[in-house]
Image (cartoon, rainbow, N blue to C red):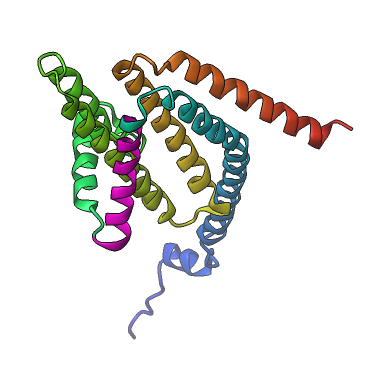
Amino acid sequence: MDKKKFPEKKILKDKEKPEQKDPGGLSGDFSSKISGWSSKLFGVIKFILAIIILPLVYSSIVSFNNEFTQVDKGLGQIFYIGIVTFLAIYLFIWEPAVIYNKGHKLLEIMFSFIKPMVNVAPFLLPIYTILFFIIYGLLALGVKSTGLIEYTLFLIGFSSIMHLVFSAKAIRSKKGDFLKANYVFGFSFIFILNIFILALGFSLVFKDFSFVNFCNVSFTMFRDIFLATFKQLFVF
């Protein structure tokens, strides 16, 4: 008679062991919930910070206008004409995204050696505005013409508002922005930095524009608004 073949003990033991469920699903759900809550909490913090710095946006605008009125009115109007011209082209004719993107790539190349700045610098720094200030400074050494400052002011107004518009559009298009915190905080910070860059540039171009006065008035007004609001909300 043929001998019966019995399965090896090892195989039997493997069969007897109950199948263990992969706990990865539960841990994955838990980790996703934690990340979701943390992102929302971070969004709330950024939203609070955005509300706090909004008075600085207002105070910097007021301070900038106060200093800019010290400049020749005709030249000041040319700067605002550059702003209006871009808005008219952007709204009714053509969105010059190609021009903005080239400046975006230029900044990425310039900050390629600083990895954290590669993704941030193109949104923070108005590259064309900075370049126009530099070009004017170099040309003004040898060219004495009112046309030079007029064209420069027009281009600075055009490029500065272009940077703000496309930066705002890029931030607003990002998904998962809880309470629009990234948009409100990010654009407020970009706006403040850009207006400080403009103030610094104009202080180098015009003798009557004081960057120190601009900073003092901006921060003094911001402090007064913040303290007044704080007293109204928390002091009874």
Q: Which residues are magenta?
A: 75-93
Q: Main secondary structure of the magenta part?
A: helix
Between residue 227 and residue 61, name the one nearer to us: 61
Q: Position of residue 62 (x, y in %)?
A: 53, 31
Q: Position of residue 3 (x, y in %)?
A: 35, 79
Q: Residue at x 31, y 16 (%)?
A: 204
Q: Which residue of the protein is positioned furthest toward the bottom in this rendering?
A: 1
**Is residue 194 found inside the magenta-colored segment of the image?**
no
Between residue 84 and residue 225, name the one nearer to us: 84
Q: Which residue of the protein is positioned furthest toward the right in this rendering?
A: 236
Left or right: 55, with 64 as reference point: right
Q: Position of residue 4 (x, y in %)?
A: 38, 79
Q: Is residue 180 above or below residue 145?
A: below
Left or right: 24, with 232 as reference point: left
Q: Quadrant of residue 132?
A: top left
Q: Is residue 138 above or below residue 31?
A: above
Left or right: 41, with 64 as reference point: right
Between residue 76 and residue 64, name the one nearer to us: 76
Q: Residue at x 20, y 19 (%)?
A: 137
**Is residue 86 found inside the magenta-colored segment of the image?**
yes
Q: Can residue 144 be seen?
A: yes
